[in-house]
Image (cartoon, rainbow, N blue to C red):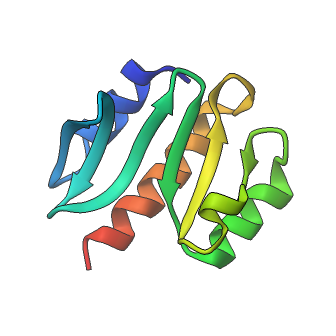
Amino acid sequence: MDSAAIEEHLAGLEGVRMSTDGGRATWRVGGRLVARLEDTETLVVRCLSADRERFVAEDPDAFYVTPAVEAHDKVLVHLPKVDDDAVRRALTAAWGLQKH
């Protein structure tokens, strides 16, 4: 999945706004992070720890955690390895967290 497909999916979700943060595309709802492109191959997605564990268990080549995000409700996505539908599910779940 590329940044244009990520933007297209998130643009279809109510209240999502895109901005740049340090030159990186960032999507938020009401100021709360949904996702951020770290670079052309890495996406950070907000998620609950149970969801993060499930995503990593289902596809450890695409979803992973580093020490920098381990203490936060986030998962990293290796975009060249991920199934587009899995990214859409993760992004929609992240959006749902920010809506409340």
Report whether 70 appears left or right of 28: right
Where is residue 83? Give x, y as percent. 69, 33
Image quadrant holding the N terminus, namely: top right
Where is residue 22? Give x, y as percent. 29, 35
Report whether 59 appears left or right of 89: right
Q: Nearer the viewer, residue 17 or 72?
A: 72
The quadrant where residue 87 appears: top right
The quadrant where residue 79 appears: top right
Report whether 11 appears left or right of 3: left
Q: How many numbered callouts?
A: 0
Position above or below: 49 against 86: below
At a point 26% along the width and 80% down the height, the residue shown is 100
Position above or below: 80 against 70: above
Position above or below: 94 against 37: below
At a point 32% along the width and 58% down the height, the residue shown is 33
Where is residue 95? Give x, y as percent. 35, 60
Q: Nearer the viewer, residue 27 or 90?
A: 27
At a point 46% along the width and 50% down the height, the residue shown is 91
At a point 50% along the width and 53% down the height, the residue shown is 45
